[in-house]
Image: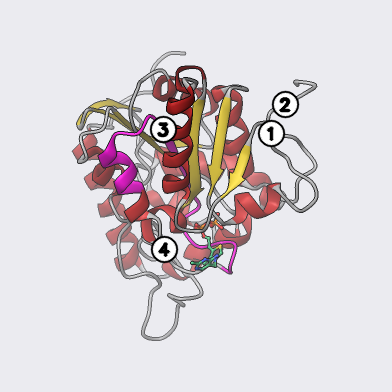
Amino acid sequence: MKTNPLFKPGHTACAGCGQAIAARLVIEAAGPNTIVANSTGCLEVFTTAYPETAWNVPWIHSLFENSAAVASGIEAALKYQGKKDTTNVIAQGGDGGTADIGLQALSGMLERGHDILYVCYDNESYMNTGIQRSGLTPFGMNTTTTPVGSLSMGNPNPKKPLPEICAAHGIPYVATASAAYFQDLQRKVKKALSIKGPKYIQVHVPCPLGWRHESNLTLDVARLAVDTGLYPLVEYESGVLSGRRQIVPKPVEEYLKVQARFKHLLKNPDEIKKIQEIADNNIKKYGLKVEAAPQA
Ligand SMILES: Cc1ncc(C[n+]2csc(CCOP(=O)(O)OP(=O)(O)O)c2C)c(N)n1
C-alpha cells in the first residue's frame, strides 16, 4: 500500500463499488503529473464531498455532459504554456455521461485530435440518480426506466457499440477493460498515455447497489462478464482491432444468476438464449475462444 496514494481512501462509495476500484487503478497507472476532468455522476459525488477530496492530483468537476470539452480546454491551455508533453490529461465519466448526454463532446474531442485519454466507467446505468437505463445498459436488465412487468422483460435494446464508434473516428487507441483485471487495465492506461492524440478506454465496473449482487462478489461478477463473452476485452489501434483477451467461454447463466437485475430472466429460457446469442456473437466477432486456459 502506498502511504500517499493519488486516490485516497475515506471517500463515500458503497461497499464493493467497482468504479472506486477502477478509478484508483487508472490514476495510479497515470501517475502524479495528471489533470482530471470528471463528469457529474457517482465517481464525482463519492470522491468530492465538500470540503474533502479523494484526489491527490489536480481535478475539476465538469457538467454531466462535458468532461471531454473541459479536458479539451485544459489540453489547449497546457499546450499554450508549453507543458503538455509533461502532463497527462484525463477526461472521465459514467456510461450515461459518456454514451448519452456527453457523446457530442466526446466525439468532438476525438475528431479534433486532442491529446487526452477519455475513461468511461461503465456501470451500465445512471446509478447516481437511481438506476435509469443508459445507452450502455445491457439487453434484459431491470432498471427503473425499463422495469420488469407482465409486458416487459427489462431493457429491450443491446448495448451501444461505443468502443467501435470511438474507433471509427480513426483515433490512435481504443480499449475495453475490466475492474477485475487489474494489470490489463493498468497496462492499457499506460499504453494509451504513451501515445499522442485522443484515446478512449471503457472499463466495466460492477455496481452492487444497481446490479443487486453481494458486495463481496464485485470482482467475481466483473470476471464472469469477461469470461462469458458478454464484455469482450479488446484493443483497437487507428481503427483496427489489434488485441483481445481470449477466454474459455462459460455459459451466460453463470453471470446472470449472481445478479438480481437479471433475476426475471432465469425462469425464461428464451430470454437467456437471446443473451447467450449476444455472447456467442462477441466470441465469434472478436475471436475470443480458446479450448483451454493458457498456462500462467
Ligand atoms: C444536464 C444534466 N442532466 C441531468 C443531471 C442529473 N444527473 C446527475 S448524475 C446523473 C447520472 C449519472 O450517470 P452515469 O453517467 O452513468 O454515472 P454513474 O452515476 O452511473 O457513475 C444524472 C442524470 C445533471 N447533473 N445534469
Mark 3: amino acid = Ile
Report how far apart the C-alphas of labels 1 and 2 lie in the structure.
5 Å
Q: Are marks 1 and 3 in contact (CB under 8 Å)?
A: no
Find out whether residue 126 is within the magenta segment: yes
Residue that carries the numbered disc 4 in the rendered image: 134
Residue that carries the numbered disc 3 in the rendered image: 116
Mark 4: amino acid = Ser
Residue that carries the numbered disc 2 in the rendered image: 5
Q: Residues within 10 Å of mark 3 (few under 14, many from 20)?
A: many
Q: Residue 22: x and y, percent?
A: 57, 37
Q: Which residues make up the magenta segment? A: 106-130
- Observer-side mark, 4 or 1, equals 1
Taking depth in this image into account, of 255 and 58 the one nearest to the observer is 58
**Which callout, 1 or 3, points at the residue further toward the start of the chain?**
1
At 38% from the left and 74% from the top, the residue drawn is 153
Q: Residue 106: x and y, percent?
A: 36, 47
Mark 1: amino acid = Phe
Left or right, 3 with respect to 64, comes to right
Report how far apart the C-alphas of labels 2 and 4 lie in the structure.
32 Å
Number of residue marks: 4
**Which callout, 4 or 1, points at the residue further toward the start of the chain?**
1
Left or right, 213 with respect to 3, comes to left
- Observer-side mark, 4 or 3, equals 3
**Which callout, 2 or 4, points at the residue further toward the start of the chain?**
2
What secondary structure is marked by label 3? loop
Q: Are marks 1 and 2 in contact (CB under 8 Å)?
A: yes
Can residue 268 be seen here? The reply is: yes
Report how far apart the C-alphas of labels 1 and 3 lie in the structure.
20 Å
